[in-house]
Image (cartoon, rainbow, N blue to C red):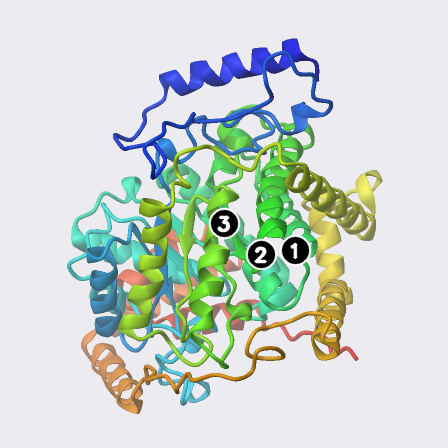
Amino acid sequence: MDSADIEAGRERWQRRYDAARRRDADFSTLSGDDVDPVYGPPAGADVPGFERIGWPGEFPYTRGLYSTGYRGRTWTIRQFSGFGNAQQTNQRYKMLLGAGGGGLSVAFDMPTLMGRDSDDERSLGEVGHCGVAIDSAADMDVLFDGIPLADVTTSMTISGPAVPVFCMYLVAAERQGADLATLDGTLQTDIFKEYIAQKEWLFAPEPHLRLIGDLMEYCNAEIPRYKPLSVSGYHIREAGSTAAQELAFTLADGFGYVELGLSRGMDVNTFAPGLSFFFDSHVDFFEEIAKFRAARRIWARWLRDRYGATSEKAQWLRFHTQTAGVSLTAQQPYNNVVRTAVEALAAVLGGTNSLHTNALDETLALPTEQAAEIALRTQAVLMEETGVTNVADPLGGSWYVEALTDRIEQQAEQIFARILTMGGGDDVEHAIGPMTSGILRGIEDGWFTGEIAESAFAYQQALEKGDKRIVGVNSHLNTVSRELDILRVSHEVEVEQKALLARRRDGRDEPAVRAALAELVAVAGGDGNMIPAMLTACRAEATLGEICSALRDTWGAYTEPARF
């Protein structure tokens, strides 16, 4: 790009910056020196390829979505939390919000993630252990007691039974008196990544996509600020993928959901802003920053050039980041504080929109209150002491960072081409779209899981040879650290939750529940939107297990084919 085009871009950025709202804050160094809100090539410089870097707030958004960077608004501190019963988790949420958290992120226990009630025989020993137990809308009432859902953005990390859990959240908001049309938050819902990595599904892909399509239509029409899909790369990376695989598999899944919306006749400029993303931030500092920058650039280009998005917001890739759980070690766990801080800083320098920082003890158990506070304060230190919010994309133009960004983008494009080929490409007819067909074929053939397994195996070999190092695991083994006190979820949580569930079943209008479930099954057997019928069932206090069992009876369950 020649100097005239660069200067024209700088002027466009300046106009956007001048018109934007900015925080009333000190944007100087610790020594008191003022810094510019953005930096670029010197006046008169010709920089080949600069259009791929550009300016913050301008296509292709490599340097961020907003001209102001974090001067306009800092990232949202959104700590992922949930354990035991709804009352215990409610207390933790109030602690996090009172200590500076900007939004809630709900972690559910394994029975809830699998669409089972707490008294299901397969739930034995799991209730409340890896998240909060939610059996019906009444549990949602307790979970958010004293927390106005109309004012707090709420993220929920659940995919298989995401839609009925979302309906319970809506019922809880109704009971608080909230105007549902104004609710704001994010539901994960991403079923593709379950088949690829996490393995928490209920049905075969097609019925899951039916539910997701219904949810997209409903939110688009009734709750426009709510984001019904958070396309998740986090679990793909935690399963052992490389950074490029995490990026490519995640964005491919996102393209699949764009095709789903288009196949429903929805306007991409209307529904695409409701798609958000969830990435892992691992410990390789510069690679992670490059991954985030490449993600924005790829998404903007594909949405504009392939899927016809013309509005800026439809081209924006907005994402939440969580530091890498898989990087935490049980050995010398205090080292995890350092790892988390480095990973969080990479997410911030990569332009994350919201952030969760892991606690030092999460490799051993759910976080204690003290460990959760340290994780929360890690973000506060980055935000308020380090000066990283002063300049938009401070690493933009770095030869190393730009080369890494280009490399990861190229690797991702190669993977996209492979997925499209698996689905038959653009020359054949597709029920939803070519990327969706490729993803479904890759799931059926075990291609995604095989690729991740190969990457995980290669990394493990490098560790065992000593080519890759983890402090406290295969290097610097001597320590004076002692064992941590960890949070233990009492067996009484399960006993009490099952008793509470029994009392709620006894006290509800059973004919109303049965009628609502029958209506839900009837809609599931047709082609109507299922959300209104599911809301009716949740208002009647139908349980999660009852709703999911009714749908399993209609659609059947999915079992992954055995592969060796």
Q: Which mark is residue 243?
A: 1
The alpha-carbon separation of the residues under discs 1 and 3 comes to: 13 Å
- Closer to the chain start, of discs 1 and 2, is 2
> In the shown orientation, is residue 399 left or right of residue 182?
right
Q: Is residue 151 visible?
A: yes
- Amino acid under disc 3: Ala
Residue type, numbered disc 1 = Ala
Query: Which residue is the site of mark 3?
Result: 347
Q: Is residue 516 visible?
A: no
Figure quadrant of the N terminus: top right
Q: CA distance from mark 3 to mark 2?
A: 14 Å
Q: Picture coordinates of residue 243 (x, y %)?
A: 65, 55
Question: Measured from the top left, where is residue 268 in percent x and y?
Answer: 55, 32
Secondary element under disc 2, as helix, strand or loop, is: loop
84 relative to 382, above or below: below
Q: Which numbered dot is residue 514?
A: none
**Image mark for residue 233:** 2
